[in-house]
Amino acid sequence: MNKEFEMTNHKGLMAGASLLAVMAATFAHADAMTDLEAAAKSEGMLTVIALPHDWCNYGAVIEGFKKKYPEITVNELNPNAGSGDEIEAIKANKGNTGPQAPDVIDVGLSFGPAAKAEGLIQPYKVATWNDIPDSVKDAEGYWYGDYYGVLAMGVNKDIITEAPTSFADLKDAKFANSVAMPGDPRTGNSSMMTVYAAGLATDGKLAGADALNAGIAYFKAMKESSNLVPVNGSSQNLAQGTTPVYFDWDYNLLAMRDNLAGNPPVDVVIPSDAVIAGVYVQAISAYAPHLNAAKLWMEYLYSDEGQIGWLSGYCHPIRFNAMSAAGTLPAELMAKLPPAEAYAKAVFPTLDEQGAAKTATADNWATEMGAN
């Protein structure tokens, strides 16, 4: 056999083997999903907690799951509960297989590692696991990011005809008495992350306390130039012109834009020099009475259908960048959002970085800003 034929034949065999391996993996997952669906349907129930229907379009997401799996009753506990309440519900129902025991939780990022450390959650990796950024998932699959918001600027276009595009732009004198945060960074996460983002905008290599302190310096200069308004930003204040530019999570600002319905017209802008994301995570209770239904719920949430459900509520699904690259994001939804490329540089501060930033805020904000 000549070498050229041998190499060609070998490559062909390798390509065929690779194709067979991919096909086998695909079929294996299809078989696994069929088995999971059957087991979940036999359980007949899924218990969720703290999922308000108007938060990230959760109402439609739940209805989508129920429509796909009508054999499974979705039992909704305490829709307005917080992350801490969800953790306590697991603790309180360790030996309870009844309807008060949550199967799954949706909590703030810091609650995931804490729940794992306490043995309150169990691992499960969804089929689309590789699309979830490593920085927002537990390597063993105990918890993983589900959706996130990105810090953005809401701009009253009646007052600010040329919207700023960056933190650097806001230093311009034309933004005097215009810029606000949603609250005190010592007590509000969105405000603290606004300060963090401002620091990152000055130097993209900063993180943790260094980024936060650089952000304090930025806002101190903004206060001294009178560009920073000493009033909390809000929908009402933006509409009235008291705070014509203010920072908040994009999903809040986009919903506000829709609610104002052009009175006044509002731009929602992702700062080009710092894209900071705040993420929530999913996990399955270690004591889930309906374990297969819980796993099926996770598969649904992380499928294209589930991810698009959150996107419909302006919350960025965790697979956003992967779906954008694959061209699977609906054009009609994308038209309502800032450009996809604006989100491609999203930075997810780690838990350690957020903890260090929180300490720096408590230690330095009041001193530098002259706040009480």
Image: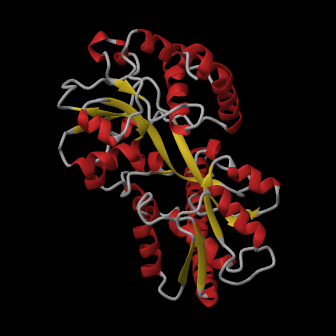
112 relative to 253 in the view: left or right? right
- Is 215 rendered above or below residue 261? above
> Looking at the image, what colour scheme do you see?
secondary structure
Name the image quarter holding residue 46: bottom right
- Is 291 rendered above or below residue 1? below
What residue sits 75% from the left and 64% below the top?
A: 122
Tell how many labels: 0
In this orientation, which residue lies closer to the viewer: 267 or 301? Answer: 267
What residue sits 32% from the left and 23% below the top?
A: 178
Q: Residue 16, how many percent across, how many down?
A: 56, 61
60 relative to 193 in the view: left or right? left
Q: Residue 239, how many percent across, how many down?
A: 25, 38
Q: Residue 34, how many percent across, how many down?
A: 57, 81
What residue sits 30% from the left and 53% below the top?
A: 333
Mark yes or no: residue 26 visible.
Answer: no
In this orientation, which residue lies closer to the viewer: 8 or 320? Answer: 320
107 relative to 236 in the view: left or right? right
In this orientation, which residue lies closer to the viewer: 280 or 9? Answer: 280
In this orientation, which residue lies closer to the viewer: 312 or 264? Answer: 264
What residue sits 82% from the left and 57% below the top?
A: 118
Q: Residue 165, how many percent across, how many down?
A: 33, 24
Direction front: furthest residue = 372
Q: Quadrant of the C terminus?
A: top right
Mark yes or no: residue 47 visible.
Answer: yes
